[in-house]
Image (cartoon, rainbow, N blue to C red):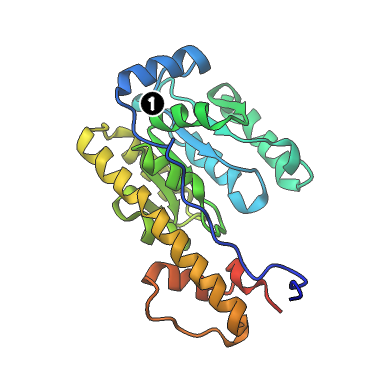
Amino acid sequence: MTAPARPLGVAVIGAGVEFRPPPSRSAVEKEVSVRFGLDARYPLYVGGFAPNQNIVGLLNAFGQLLSQPAFAGTPLVFVGKREGDTVYDEAKEIDRRLERDDLKSRVRFPGFEQDEALVLLYQAAAALLLPSFVEGFGLSAVEAAKCGTPAIVTRGSPLPGLLDDAAVSIEPQNTNELAHTMARVGASSPTSSNSAGLTSAGSSAFRLCSESTSCVICVAAVGARQFTRMPYFSPSIERHCMSPTSAIFAAP
């Protein structure tokens, strides 16, 4: 059997068992304060800094919240490496935006973190932010949901259908909508009941994994251009598989 010249598609593995709600939120917040110097419930971004991630839009939205009393002293936290994405012109735009409005003093870049630390950062966050212009999946939003933390995600991605009530969807080009949503989600207090609901939604990633694997296998068998509606897929994965931007359509 000859392997294809390039991959036919990608099936995303669900978040690991280490991503789970904290037994004590106050204990986690104390540990995050000691380890990272983060004392307030903060909006959190986990990922890369490529142009499609809409980092400048995220910074602009956060800048709108600085004057609100509810956000006094609240940092915006970015977890991930910037080094690999500094080749993009947007990297300079990010640096310029950080220098304006004293934003640099309110944004934290702890860098890349291993899962053990990342779980803590998810658990203590007010919300996970993923306002990408283009998002193929967005595993960080699933990980956050499994930790009991809501996600703000791009409306055109598979995440709203996958996470249901665990996610609030926005149009990534609308900075005002993103800022308003950050303020609304950040003002809500975490409870054990909504954490359980978020965790249940995050766990559905395992179903997505199995369905997307089936989707990739079907494409491999019949060819991407002949791929038609598969009625046994859930609506969210079917929309994602049939999207022209899906990785599944990498086949010639």
What residue sits right under mark 1 in the picture? 41
Residue 155 visible in this rendered orientation of the protein? no
Q: Nearer the viewer, residue 245 or 229?
A: 229
Residue 88 shown left or right of residue 131 in the figure: right
Toward the front, the furthest residue is 1
Q: Nearer the viewer, residue 36 or 14?
A: 14
In percent of width and height, residue 206 lies at: 41, 55
**What residue is drawn where x is 58% and y is 24%?**
102
Q: Which of the image's four quarters has the C terminus?
A: bottom right
Relative to residue 170, is residue 182 depicted above or below? above
Residue 37 visible in this rendered orientation of the protein? yes
**What residue is drawn where x is 20% and y is 38%?**
193
Q: How many labels, in total?
A: 1
**What residue is drawn where x is 30% and y is 33%?**
187
Mark 1 crowdedness (10 Å alpha carbons): few <14, some 14-19, many ≥20:
many
Relative to residue 61, is residue 218 depicted above or below? below
Q: Which of the image's four quarters has the N terminus?
A: bottom right
Toward the left, the furthest residue is 193
Q: Amino acid at mark 1?
A: Arg
Toward the bottom, the furthest residue is 226
In percent of width and height, residue 95 lies at: 69, 34
Label 1's element?
Answer: loop
In percent of width and height, residue 124 lies at: 39, 27
